[in-house]
Amino acid sequence: MTTESAHAPHPSQATAVQHRSAPSIHPPRGAAGRSAPLRPRDVGGRGPVIGLVVADTLAIGAAVALVPGVPRPELLFVLLAAVQPALHGCRGLYRASLSPSALAELPALLGLALIQWFAVTEVVAAYDSRSAIGWAALGSAVAVHALLACAARGAVFHGRRRRAARRPQSALIVGRGPVAHQLTAALYEHSGYGLRPVGRVDPGHPGAADPEPLPVLVTPEDVSRAVIQNSVRHAVFTGPPEAAPDTAALVELFSQHRCRLWTVDGGAAASDAHRRPQTAEHLWGFSVQPLNGGLHRPVARAAKRAMDALLAALALVATAPLMAVCALAVRLSDGPGVIFRQERIGLDGRPFTLLKFRTIAPVDEHESATRWSVALDQRMSVTGGLLRRSSLDELPQLWNVLRGDMSLVGPRPERPYFVAKFSRAHPGYQARHRMPVGITGLAQINGLRGDTSIEDRARFDNHYIDSWSPWQDVCILARTAASLFRLGGS
């Protein structure tokens, strides 16, 4: 029996259904047993985001047209429409949501509308003093804008729920026990969430002990084949991810297939409530949060890439004189061969050539690929030591960012030898590669550089990926810039 043949359990039968044998899932024709990850466009789609952008833009136009006393309405509309997507994107108003609520977003819409209108009207007034807007007109415009945006987004969410009910996406439930059964039944009964369970993942399943409403997937091979065969788009963890067996391997597998990951709070102890993040997201009353962050949305990936390319280009121009001085110093101090090239592992495990200013000449390629740290190497010249302590040796990586090999912010890339070694020793290390690698990252600004804990680095890197936002990147870049004055380095 394949996962496609699983029947929808009725809510009253969620914990009492007839026994089914273990699933037999076969790869689709032509797959030849290979795991073929879904392309990003197969998962998210840009329709929902475009619908929200259009709704927000229409709200601006209506507010400009309806509020009397608004000067230069055409210019105001253009400026407001240009600023709004960035503000709403940073606030998370375009993120994927299982239970979106326009009313819950109203306070955020009101605050962002106030920022937009105040900033834009000040710019227009500075350009033309005759175009100043009164406080009464400004307050009215903000209120009308926020209310119309709330109404328009509510219409978009209503249409999205209806489409989701007609065309639900396949999902896998990860976990066991009553919560898994209740959640499965709720998703079948309430199709507006847009998830259709097609299997349950349980690496520690005892076999034929209990009746199951869904096929149980035990091995990674079963999970991978089920994802491909059923075009699975979502994986829902029915408990804290760290409590599930083999979570790191499952997260990595789902991430390779570009699945959206969710974690459901099945009801923790009251004493633990203060430690659980508050969220308005829910699946039929079960609190739910995204597990693999916002970067799995096509729009978010495009925004991060655009920001990287723009800032890297500006930084290359701004630091060109400094890099010329560094290159000259390396040439005079250590001889020919100013740029050091080394193979590193990037997004999805793909290798690329990383560029740095040379601070030491390795004995051979084997030493370069397998020696962990050279921070205290006696062969390092004064120039090399200064470049490493000031992190100026990393400046050529701006070219890697511009090429698309790296990001400005992300997990630091490592050599293939150490990626294989650390992946075996530290659960979760391989999952770092679901995000583009970066020049700096959350681990680095917390002092995890050089000869520091790999387990701690992996934990910080995966937390960064799970909680990614454009504002978090800005904060990390600001803290990195401030740390350059402290001459740390590795």
Image (cartoon, rainbow, N blue to C red):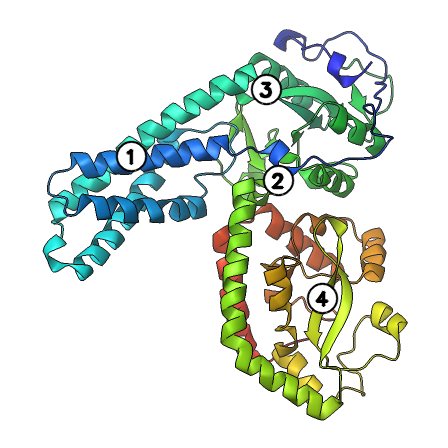
Q: How many residues crowd around disc 1 within 10 Å: few (fewer than 14), some, or many (20 or more)?
A: many
Tell me the element at label 3.
loop
- Is there a contact, CB below 8 Å, between mark 2 and mark 4? no
The three-letter code of the residue at mark 3 reads: Pro
Amino acid on which the number 1 mark rests in the picture = Ala
Residue named by callout 1:
59
The mark closer to the camera, 1 or 2, is: 1
Label pair 3/2, CB-CB below 8 angstroms = no
Q: Secondary structure at mark 1?
A: helix
* Residue identified by numbered label 3: 168
Alpha carbon distance from label 4 to label 3 = 42 Å
Q: Secondary structure at mark 4?
A: strand
Mark 4: give few (<14), some (14-19) or many (20+) Cα within 10 Å: many
- Say if residue 263 shows up in the picture: no
Q: Earlier in the sequence, mark 1 or mark 3?
A: 1
Above or below: residue 154 compared with residue 342: above
Name the residue type under label 2: Leu
- Residue hosting label 4: 354
Q: CA separation, marks 3 and 2?
A: 20 Å
Q: Earlier in the sequence, mark 3 or mark 2?
A: 3
Which dot marks residue 291?
A: 2
Circles 1 and 2 in contact, beta carbons < 8 Å: no
The residue under the point 44% across, 45% down is: 89
